[in-house]
Image (tube, helix red, strand yellow):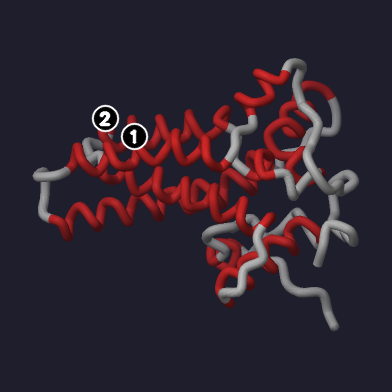
């Protein structure tokens, strides 16, 4: 399925190429929508620091378990954030404008790499909250936050690749086809990108069209 033959619900026209600026001024637009390289530079050190700060607090199996718990928490954030926040679509006013800036532009220009990366306006508060809750309020080792950030960064890069790459690996091909159904078949379903199993759990899987 390609961007040239959309059949999705609830969205506008699908365009190829690079999206125009969604806000006045190129600097602000660059802050709201960053490249995959910038996302990696921003978040990879955060994950590494979370691991380093946890060394010696517990044995490797325990730390690995907390890292996996952080990753799993991210996958739930990905699913519910995508389903509830990014697909809350007011029709008018500031809400409609904010939705377009944060996610609507990605559906209109799905091949634009910068629009495939979650805006720092959302990712920075999410990562900060994960570390604050885990290391501060809950007293968990920082490696929990590292697992959360690693899951987020993996999602970011995978999402971008699914839109721009041509995977030959069967797993990646299936992930790409599944996500394209969300874009071009029914954008009210298929919210799991790096973790599509949550769609099965919560009843929002998007199936192939009948042959």
Question: Which residue occupies the foreground of this view, 79 or 67?
Answer: 67
Relative to 94, 39 lies left or right: left
Mark carried by residue 136 = 2
Cα distance between the residues tagged 2 and 1: 7 Å
Residue 56: x %, y % from top left: 9, 45
Query: Who's the residue at 48% across and 30% down the image?
Result: 124
Residue 139: x %, y % from top left: 22, 36
For the view shown, which residue lies furthest in the bottom direction?
A: 211
Tell me which corner region of the image, top left, top right, bottom left or bottom right, holds residue 81. top right
For the view shown, which residue lies furthest in the top direction?
A: 25
- Which numbered disc, 2 or 1, marks the residue that appears first in the sequence? 1
SS at circle 1: helix
Q: In the rendered view, tell whether residue 140 sits above or below residue 151.
A: above
Q: Do the residues labelled 2 and 1 touch (CB within 8 Å)?
A: yes
Query: Who's the residue at 76% across and 56% down the image?
Result: 183
Question: Which residue occupies the foreground of this view, 13 or 202?
Answer: 13
Disc 2 versus disc 1: nearer the observer: 1
Query: Who's the residue at 77% across and 22% down the image?
Result: 94
Tell me which corner region of the image, top left, top right, bottom left or bottom right, holds residue 186. bottom right
| Label 2, residues with CA under 10 Å away: few <14, some 14-19, many ≥20 | few
Which residue lies under the disc numbered 1? Answer: 131
């Amino acid at each position: 399925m390609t961007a040239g033959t959309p059949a999705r619900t609830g969205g506008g026209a699908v365009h190829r190429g690079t999206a125009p600026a969604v806000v006045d001024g190129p600097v602000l637009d660059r802050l709201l929508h960053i490249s995959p390289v910038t996302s990696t530079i921003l978040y990879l050190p955060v994950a590494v620091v979370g691991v380093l700060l946890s060394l010696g607090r517990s044995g490797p199996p325990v730390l690995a378990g907390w890292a996996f718990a952080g990753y799993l928490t991210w996958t739930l954030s990905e699913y519910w954030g995508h389903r509830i926040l990014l697909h809350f679509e007011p029709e008018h006013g500031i809400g409609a404008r904010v939705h377009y800036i944060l996610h609507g532009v990605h559906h209109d220009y799905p091949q634009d790499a910068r629009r495939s990366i979650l805006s720092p306006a959302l990712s920075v508060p999410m990562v900060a909250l994960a570390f604050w809750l885990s290391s501060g309020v809950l007293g968990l080792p920082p490696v929990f936050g590292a697992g959360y950030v690693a899951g987020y960064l993996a999602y970011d890069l995978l999402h971008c690749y699914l839109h721009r790459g041509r995977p030959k690996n069967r797993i990646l091909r299936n992930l790409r086809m599944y996500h394209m159904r969300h874009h071009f078949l029914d954008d009210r379903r298929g919210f799991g990108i790096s973790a599509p199993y949550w769609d099965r759990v919560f009843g929002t899987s998007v199936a192939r069209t009948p042959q």
